[in-house]
Amino acid sequence: MRTLKTIVALAAVAVIVAGFGTEHSPAVEPGNRGLLLLSNSEPARILLRACGNCHSNRTDWPWYSHVAPFSWWIGQHVREGREKLDFSEWETYSIWQKRDKLESMCGLISTGRMPPRVYTAIHPEAKLTEANKKAVCVWVKEQTIAAR
């Protein structure tokens, strides 16, 4: 019985200590530069719904994102997502970066590589229908032409 209590106590301490290394950005940062890309159009709403949690500073951190080891995994995915594309930093990208990101956006969405299946399994609201994918790709094409 004493061994079991010791194991439980050590596990609790490990979870608490592990949580100190995981910082999450606030859901909405004041003075956000960007998201001007995402006007109030239907494709913009689709992108924010399906992609905003990982690709902007508008992350809605669920309760389990504060519990190790999930916090490490989720935090890493969000960091990687923002490194590749961050709608909150859109206005800081060069014309070439914007064009590149727009062109890859449609391909990743239309082939089903984004949003990842593991994400949509937990967040069904992020699933994209064929109509959603088409609307985003049409919008991306318009934005790509405008970015020239």
Image (cartoon, helix red, strand yellow):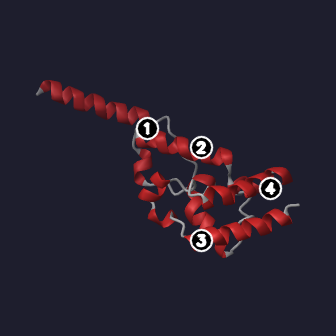
Kindly identify which residue carries mark 1.
19
In percent of the image, x 42 and y 43: which residue is there? 70
The answer to which quarter of the image holds residue 11 is top left
Per the rendering, the mark at residue 132 is 3
Secondary structure beneath disc 3? helix
Tell which tag, 2 or 1, sits nearer the viewer.
2
Q: State the residue in front, 113 or 87.
A: 113
Q: Nearer the viewer, mark 3 or mark 2?
A: 3
Q: Nearer the viewer, mark 4 or mark 2?
A: 4
Mark 2 — residue? 79
Q: Position of residue 141 (x, y in %)?
A: 77, 66
Residue 123: x %, y % from top left = 45, 60
From the viewer's perspective, is 71 left or right of 10?
right
Name the disc covering residue 99, or none.
Answer: 4
Q: Note whether residue 79 is visible.
A: yes
Along the polypeptide, which appears first: circle 3 or circle 4? 4
Q: Which kind of residue does numbered mark 1 sit on? A: Gly
Please, what is the three-letter code of the amino acid marked with disc 2?
Arg
User: Reading the chain from its start, which is encountered first: label 3 or label 1?
Assistant: 1
Q: Nearer the viewer, residue 148 or 29?
A: 148
Dot 3: within a 10 Å radius of its alpha carbon, few (fewer than 14), some, or many (20 or more) residues?
Answer: some
Callouts 3 and 1 close, C-beta under 8 Å: no
